[in-house]
Structure formats: structure tokens, C-alpha cells
Amino acid sequence: MTESCTLIIFGATGNLAQRKLLPALYHLERADLLPPEMRIVCSGRKAHSQSDWLAYVQQVLEQHAREPLSGDDTDRFAARMVYHQGDLADPATFAGMATLLNDSNYPANRVFYVSLPPAVYGDVVEALDRQGMLEESDAWRRVVIEKPFGCDRESAQNLQRKLGRHLREDQTYRIDHYMGKAMVQNVLVSRFANLMFEPLWNRNYIDQVQITRTEQLGVGSRAGFYEGTGALRDMLQSHLMQLMALVAMEPPVSMDADELRDEKVKVLKTVRPIHHDAVHAQAYRAQYGAGRVDGEAVPAYLEEPGVDPHSVTETYAALRLYVDNWRWRGVPFYLRTGKRMAEARTMVAISFKQPPKHFFRTAHIERPPPNWLIMSIAPEESLRLEISVKEPGLAMKTRQIGLDAPFRCEHHAQTDAYEGLLMDLIEGDRSLFLRYDEVEWAWRIVDPVLGVWATERDFIPTHPAGQWEPEESYRIFDKAHHRWRHRLDPEP
């Protein structure tokens, strides 16, 4: 049985808590997965009475829960919760929290979820330690922080030094919600539970790997955050680099958290450094202009509220990387992400090499397209294998067909990534949380690109919203026949 604990959420009135954390905890309550004695302390600056807070939570759940609320489940969930008001800049806030948590009604095991801007992570952890709330003499203590973990390698190191003064690495849970998505975890299962893939999973058979995360949404209300971040930091350095590590890693000795993370770090360590002079050949950035998405006119990035009209912040970023180890030497990994694109899609697309001999020249058959293995993460959750077959009829003609295997059937319950990650957090399973060396090595890879882009402040290419990236992005490809795979189905 999972040990009971007290979960403290800093920033409980913020956007993440509203959209993800509170609904995820409620869904776990409905599924009877929360420890019986678990308590939830919600901390925020706004003044709420306990009854006002519970009414607020009710409104949040009505808006964001997957299903209509159940009275019994809602009552049980409310009985776990208490609101603690205070300004985090005031030491009295933490002193009052320490007094509250020392009450015997609150389990001694504690999880502190810091759902706040990264700039205050170090200050909050220091204040917790000053009040003795991280002391583990009687029970365990865990602290969760959300990405971004710094804005470059140097800032990530500075953040780690601040946290390291008060926390051990095994107490620090760096959460990347993408790692909690079922289909992301299915990348591991597809690789290591199906022996037929292993002999082909190397440079001898694979021609290229593409990892894509595109969306139709614009920057929306996140301009304040996005202006100082951009697509490379926001998505590619974190989510897509993690996906690449899962695709490229060697089989771990076990699924133990450190064994799994050791293998991911080995991948990141063997990524060929991007030299300053090679940045333009291996990286591309762009920004969306005005256009139409699903038939509706949308503004350019520079016209979004809160965006500097002279901004060169990239909303599209693509990289070509090489993993210089025995398995992958010479195979290009293409990573790309973008806003206001033609489709919203997240997938891993693996293209296999052509057969060494073309047997059908005498039948005047054109060279068939390559085989593809596509792991679709969103919007579909599926596995697709494309192979060449003969067309029906007397003529010797071939065509490509797709063998599709949906991951989720109609009777499978929907879950959110945060539900699984919260359960792992309570149970102390660190497998899907990032270790510091993963973070630092990922920053090492992209830092040269960020350095060059930081000096180029006069111009950035644009593409119309609602369309795919400009053809200029194709300059990063290693071979002339490489093209972006845009859709799950073959390109027309």
C-alpha cells in the first residue's frame, strides 16, 4: 500500500494547478488511488476562507474534469484539502506552514510541489529548509519543480547549486509532463518488448529519425514567458530531446530509475557537438506570420499581445543531431517544433534504408518509397508500419500500404500524464523524472545554437500561419532525398 503523505502545492491558484494538478488529483480520488490518510495543502497569495476555497475548487473541477462530478468523490476530495494563505516573500508564511504541518492530522511524509515561476525555486526551497520542513529524521521529503530548468547551461548550473544546498538529488523531482504521456512510455515498450525490432534498430538499417511536435495554437497569453524563451528552449531542448534519448538509448539493465536515466544520459553525452561554424547548417529557426488556421484568420507573432514588435524570438525550431556511438553513427536525428503550423501533431518517424538491390528494374517499377515506422503520440495514439506491396492487377506495379495499430481502444479509460506522474511522485518512483545530468547535457547540446542566434537580432525568416515550415528549413537535411514527414498518412 502506498504510504500516506501530505502534498503541499505552492501556486495553487495558478494556471497549472487549475488545468492539471487539481483535476489530476480529483481523478485519482475517483479511481480510489490516493492513500487514505493523504492530505492536500494548497498555498496561495489570495485570501480565501476554507469554504471559499472549496467552492473555488468545485468550479475548477467543473471546468476541467473529464467527466461530470460525483458528489461522494467530491466530498472525499474536499475533506483532504486545506487552504493556506500567504505571501512567499514573507518568512511568516513558511513559519505558519511549518506549524500547520506539525499537526498530527497531517502525515509526516511530505511532497512540496513548487508550481511557481522558476526564478523563485531556490528561494522557496531555502525558506522550507530554514523552517526545518525538509528535515528527514522522521519521514521522507520530496520537492517537485517544473521546467524550464534554467534558460541555458550556466543558469541550469546556478539553479542546481541553489537547490543542492538544501536538497539531495534523490529528493529533487524535475517533472516533464511529456514523460508521463502513455504513448511516450510506449516508445520504451515498443522497443524492448518486441524482439523483431532490435536487429533493425541501428545504423545498418535506419536511414533517418524524425521527431516532431507541432501545434496550431499561437503564443496566446504566454507572450511574457515566450518572449524570453522561444521554441528551442520551450520544447526542443526538453520534450523532444527526451524523446530522442528514449529512441536511441541502449536497453537498461533494469527499469530501475537510475538504470533507465543512466542510459538516457549516455545518449546525450554521445551527441556530436555543434560547432559554432556549423549552426546554420544544422539548425533553423523561423517565426509565424499572419495566416489562416482552419479557415480562420490569425495574427502574426509580432501582432500578438505582449510581443515586442521587433522580436526575433523563434516560434519554429529544427535541429539535425548525430549520436556518435556504435549503434547510431552516421544516422541523422531531425528534431523540430513549431506553433501555428498546418496541423497539431507529435510523432516519432523512423525511415529505413532502401534494399541494397532493386530487383524489379525489368518490370519498369519505380524505386519504391522507404519503409517507415511511425509512433504517433498525438492526436492519435498509434503505431504505423509502412511497407511496399504489389498493386492488384496484371502489371507489376507497387504501392505503399500502412499497417495501423491504435494504442487506445474505445473501452480504455482516458488519463492525463499528470495522474501517472503524481502517483509516481507519491510512491517515490523517479524513473520518469529528470536527473540533473540529463538537464545539463541537454543544455550542452543546444547552447552553441542559442549563442549564435543571440547575436542575430536583425532578421528572422517567417512562414504563414497555418502552413508548414518554409523550404529553407530543408537546408539542415543530411541527404538530398530527406524530406519532413508531416502527417501520419503518406504525403500525397
Image: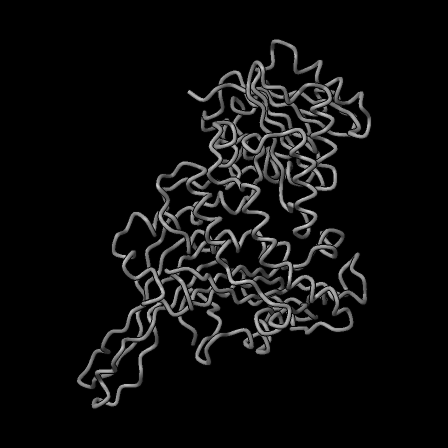
Coloration of the structure image = one colour
Q: Where is residue 282 in the image (x, y as percent from the top left)?
A: 57, 70
Q: Nearer the viewer, residue 310 or 56?
A: 310
- Residue at left offset 48%, top offset 19%: 3
Task: In the rendered view, tell whether residue 95 sits above or below residue 469.
Answer: above
Image quarter of the C terminus: bottom left
Q: Where is residue 442 in the image (x, y as percent from the top left)?
A: 57, 53
Direction top: furthest residue? 104
Image quarter of the N terminus: top left
Q: Position of residue 221 (x, y in %)?
A: 72, 52
- Residue at left offset 37%, top offset 60%: 327
- Residue at left offset 49%, top offset 42%: 180
Q: Which of 200 and 46 is in front in this view?
A: 200
**Residue 229 falls in image quadrant:** bottom right
Q: In this view, does 312 lie to the left or right of 396?
A: right
Q: Is residue 254 left or right of residue 356?
A: right
Q: Is residue 362 left or right of residue 226?
A: left
Q: Is residue 62 left or right of residue 380?
A: right
**Residue 113 falls in image quadrant:** top right
Task: In the rendered view, tell whether residue 391 sits above or below residue 309.
Answer: below
Task: In the rendered view, tell whether residue 163 sits above or below residue 323.
Answer: above
Q: Position of residue 181 (x, y in %)?
A: 47, 45
